[in-house]
């Protein structure tokens, strides 16, 4: 009887396994294929090339800043060169472009108001992107798209918009500045050569890029070509330099909307930078104010000490004066007694002689 029950139980388990939906089996197969893909970071690769931990949503202080990085600036040139891939070396846009075309990352369209949206409706189709910006490609019989390195418009991407967040992590009691999203900006010259037209291409989440950027090395010094670091370390260490063009505020305005002149915008940018530096510096209190209060306390203490010292010196001078008077009186009295005693002795001697 027990054997029959065991057989029925085993038969039910087998039927449950085979009864899984076809979609679930396909999803499992796709996941296994993705893990077998050499370009997808494996668990060993993630351990060998770790990325920064994501920012917690329950931080006690946070400020989002939008910057524009000019790749002509020497501090940002590491993201631009080499323009065309040389062996395993490639610049940031070439890395993003290849990942987008192979479907390893998802990019989202740039909205006209400048705000990023990572909703499913705002996803960018890679083929539509190539057609919209007139990027040459060849379509193979199997449906795949073939692109040469010279056709990737990395030479025309000369700046980036980045969204960064400065926050205080109360769990580790540390201050961090972390990049959240990137937007490459393509500049194309017109037919008359009067100037280039800027095209913000798309937004991409930095967390999606980070596992791949850890393996991409860039040179960061003109004097010592052996100084290299990964692009992920470059962003994690905030080696870039960019001007602030927007902050998250209640009105949703950019700096150009409420700064009417260039001087006013420069002043506002410096003010925001100073606020960030001041917050990081004064997390545990304003040291300058503490020093000033300490100096005031020391000055008051010194003043009290000098008053007490003066009182003591005055008392000592008075006591010494009184002591002098007493000693003079005592010496005078002793002198009188001595003279009196000597006088009486002479009289006695004279009487004895008589």
Image (tube, rainbow, N blue to C red):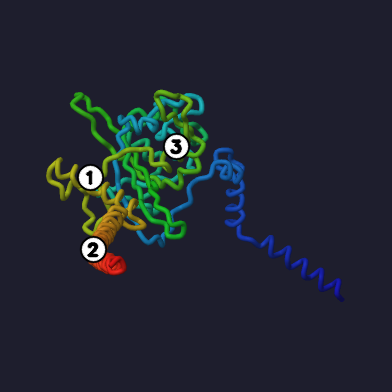
Residue sitting nearer the eye, 1 or 158: 158
First in residue order: circle 2 vs circle 1: 1
Disc 3 is placed on an element classified as helix
The residue to which callout 1 is attached is 270
The crowding category of the residue bearing disc 3, from other C-alpha atoms within 10 Å (few below 14, some 14 to 19, many at least 20), is many
x and y percentages locating residue 352 in the rendered image: 31, 68
Q: Which of the two marks, 3 or 1, is nearer to us in this view?
A: 1
Q: Residue 261 lies in what quarter of the image?
A: top left
Confirm whether residue 313 shows in the render: yes
| Label ID, residue 328 | 2
What secondary structure is found at the residue carrying circle 1?
Answer: helix
Q: Nearer the viewer, residue 256 or 222?
A: 222
Q: Position of residue 140 (x, y in %)?
A: 49, 31
Q: Position of residue 286 (x, y in %)?
A: 30, 56
CA gap, disc 2 and disc 3: 93 Å
Q: Is residue 164 above or below residue 168?
A: above
Q: Which residue is under mark 3? A: 231
SS class of the residue under badge 2?
helix
In the image, residue 94 lies at what x, y percent? 42, 33
Where, quadrant-wise, is the N terminus in this rendering?
bottom right
């Amino acid at each position: 009887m027990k054997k029959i029950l065991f057989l029925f139980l085993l038969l039910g388990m087998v039927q449950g396994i085979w009864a899984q939906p076809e979609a679930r089996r396909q999803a499992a197969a796709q996941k296994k294929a993705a893990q077998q893909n050499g370009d997808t970071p494996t668990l060993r690769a993630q351990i060998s090339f770790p990325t920064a931990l994501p920012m917690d949503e329950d931080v006690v202080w946070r400020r989002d800043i939008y910057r524009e990085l000019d790749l002509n600036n020497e501090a940002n040139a590491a993201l631009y060169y080499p323009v065309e891939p040389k062996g395993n070396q490639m610049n940031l846009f070439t890395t993003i472009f290849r990942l987008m075309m192979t479907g390893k990352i998802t990019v989202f369209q740039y909205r006209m108001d400048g705000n990023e949206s990572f909703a499913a409706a705002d996803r960018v189709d890679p083929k539509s992107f190539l057609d919209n910006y007139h990027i040459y490609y060849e379509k193979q019989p199997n449906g795949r798209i073939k692109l040469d390195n010279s056709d990737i418009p990395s030479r025309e991407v000369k700046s980036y918009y980045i969204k960064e967040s400065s926050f205080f992590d109360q769990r580790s009691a540390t201050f961090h500045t972390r990049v959240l999203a990137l937007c490459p900006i393509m500049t194309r010259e017109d037919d008359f050569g009067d100037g280039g037209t800027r095209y913000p291409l798309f937004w991409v989440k930095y967390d999606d890029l980070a596992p791949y950027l850890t393996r991409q090395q860039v040179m960061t010094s003109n004097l010592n070509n052996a100084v290299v670091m990964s692009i992920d370390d470059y962003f994690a260490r905030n080696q870039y330099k960019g001007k602030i063009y927007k902050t998250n505020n209640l009105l949703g305005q950019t700096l150009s909307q409420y700064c009417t002149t260039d001087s006013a915008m420069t002043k506002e940018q410096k003010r925001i930078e100073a606020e960030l530096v001041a917050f990081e510096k004064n997390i545990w209190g304003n040291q300058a104010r503490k020093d000033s209060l300490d100096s005031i306390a020391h000055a008051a203490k010194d003043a009290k000490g000098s008053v007490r010292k003066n009182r003591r010196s005055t008392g000592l001078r008075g006591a010494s004066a009184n002591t002098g008077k007493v000693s003079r009186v005592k010496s005078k009295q002793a002198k009188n007694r001595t003279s009196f005693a000597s006088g009486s002795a002479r009289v006695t001697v004279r009487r004895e002689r008589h």
